[in-house]
Image (cartoon, rainbow, N blue to C red):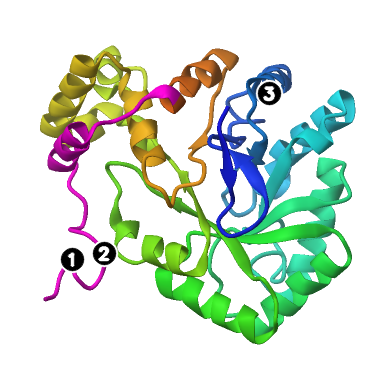
């Protein structure tokens, strides 16, 4: 396994992160335990979850919330491997039906952190991530709440997720004014089919020293051998999505075949070639899928191949403002 620093922080994490959103939904407890055991055995030390994972995200069905954290907590208690992993979770999404049971008020942050710690059966969270930007709560309030968690030893580092470039800049400017480290990571959707963050989020991460943790590295399955999956008809509505991108997918899967690599591995390797990317999140439903994902670490994409991928899946044209102005 390869390891790298999380942005400018001294923290070192594996180049692949274990995503646990499937735990409690499409993956049962026994298989979840097996996946976490296999992840640690393979050298993966970065585990990503969220308080909202493992249940329905529809209002009125909040009883499913927290299941992923509970499964991880039970595994930690059974395995005794807490000190072998970097544990990341998130706060923002609604955890109950009350008006203060969501977003990033100091009120909710405090309660949500304590609830996550209880479910995870640990006394600290290594990276506590804001799951979304909350433009209705001032940064003075957010940072004061986060600083208190750090002072109490409940949280070691703070991260963001789904932030715009200017949100990262605003957050860091406010943190620096308080002599606080602020963010060390940003978790964004990023893959060959979704490259919008190249405009401003990636430059912001580079400037402020944030590690980038891409979610959905396979574009919702499009980059994981979608043509065969669509032909099998295993996922309702997936064929329509594939048909929309069929020309690009045929070119992409043809290129992967010429390389002798699986499309999913090429997609992950493409992310790993970007120096700002810390660890793409892989979300296996089985141990076999986890082990297959490790292949991406050994793939080196030549400049010629990278150029072909840019033709098949063009980005926004570079970084702002050069991508659209002189």
Q: What number of labels is visible?
A: 3
Tell me where residue 256 appears, x and y as whole percent.
Answer: 23, 21
SS under mark 3: helix
Q: Is residue 212 above or below residue 302?
A: below
Tell me where residue 304 appears, x and y as whole percent.
Answer: 16, 34
Q: Which residue is mark 2?
A: 319
Task: Decide if residue 34 is on the left or right side of residue 301.
Answer: right
310 magenta-colored: yes
Residue 74 circle label: none
CB-based contact (under 8 Å), mark 2 and mark 1:
yes
Residue 32 circle label: 3
216 magenta-colored: no
CB-based contact (under 8 Å), mark 3 and mark 2:
no
Task: Decide if residue 130 is on the left or right side of residue 272.
Answer: right
Q: Quadrant of residue 84?
A: top right
Q: Work out whether residue 80 can be spotted.
A: yes
SS under mark 2: loop
Crowdedness near tag 2: few (<14), some (14–19) or many (≥20) residues, C-alpha within 10 Å: some
- Majority secondary structure of the magenta segment? loop
Q: Which residue is mark 1?
A: 323
Q: CA distance from mark 1 to mark 3?
A: 43 Å
Tell me where residue 198 appears, x and y as whole percent.
Answer: 31, 58
Q: Is residue 210 above or below residue 104?
A: above
- The residue positioned 74% from the left and 68% from the top of the image is 108
Question: Which quarter shows the C terminus?
Answer: bottom left
Tell me where residue 255 appears, x and y as whole percent.
Answer: 17, 23
Q: Nearer the viewer, residue 179 or 251?
A: 179
Q: Work out whether residue 51 can be spotted.
A: no
Question: Which quarter shows the N terminus?
Answer: top right
Q: Nearer the viewer, residue 103 or 34?
A: 34
């Amino acid at each position: 396994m390869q390891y790298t620093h999380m942005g400018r922080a001294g923290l070192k994490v594996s180049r692949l992160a274990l995503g646990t959103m499937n735990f409690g939904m499409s993956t049962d407890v026994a298989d979840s335990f097996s996946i976490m055991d296999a992840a640690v055995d393979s050298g993966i030390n970065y585990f990503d979850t969220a308080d909202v994972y493992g249940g329905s995200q529809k209002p009125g069905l909040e009883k499913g919330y927290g299941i992923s954290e509970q499964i991880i907590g039970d595994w930690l208690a059974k395995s005794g491997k807490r000190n072998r992993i970097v544990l990341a979770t998130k706060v923002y999404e609604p955890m109950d039906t009350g008006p203060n049971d969501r977003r990033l008020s100091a009120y909710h942050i405090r309660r949500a952190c304590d609830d996550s710690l209880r479910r995870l059966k640990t006394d600290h969270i290594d990276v506590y991530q804001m799951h979304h930007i909350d433009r209705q709560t001032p940064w003075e309030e957010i940072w004061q709440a986060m600083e208190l968690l750090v002072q109490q030893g409940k949280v070691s580092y703070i991260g963001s997720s789904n932030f715009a470039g200017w949100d990262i800049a605003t957050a860091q400017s406010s943190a620096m004014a308080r002599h606080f480290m602020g963010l060390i990571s940003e978790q964004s959707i990023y893959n060959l089919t979704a490259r919008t963050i190249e405009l401003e989020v990636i430059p912001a991460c580079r400037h402020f020293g944030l590690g980038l943790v891409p979610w959905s590295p396979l574009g919702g399955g499009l980059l994981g051998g979608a043509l065969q999956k669509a032909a099998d008809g295993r996922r309702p509505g997936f064929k329509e999505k594939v048909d929309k991108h069929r020309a690009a997918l045929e070119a992409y899967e043809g290129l992967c075949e010429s390389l002798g690599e699986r499309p999913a591995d090429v997609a992950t390797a493409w992310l790993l070639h970007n120096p700002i990317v810390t660890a793409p999140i892989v979300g296996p439903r089985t141990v076999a899928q986890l082990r297959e994902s490790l292949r991406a670490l050994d793939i080196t994409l030549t400049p010629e191949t990278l150029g072909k991928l840019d033709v098949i899946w063009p980005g926004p044209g570079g970084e702002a403002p050069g991508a659209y102005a002189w």
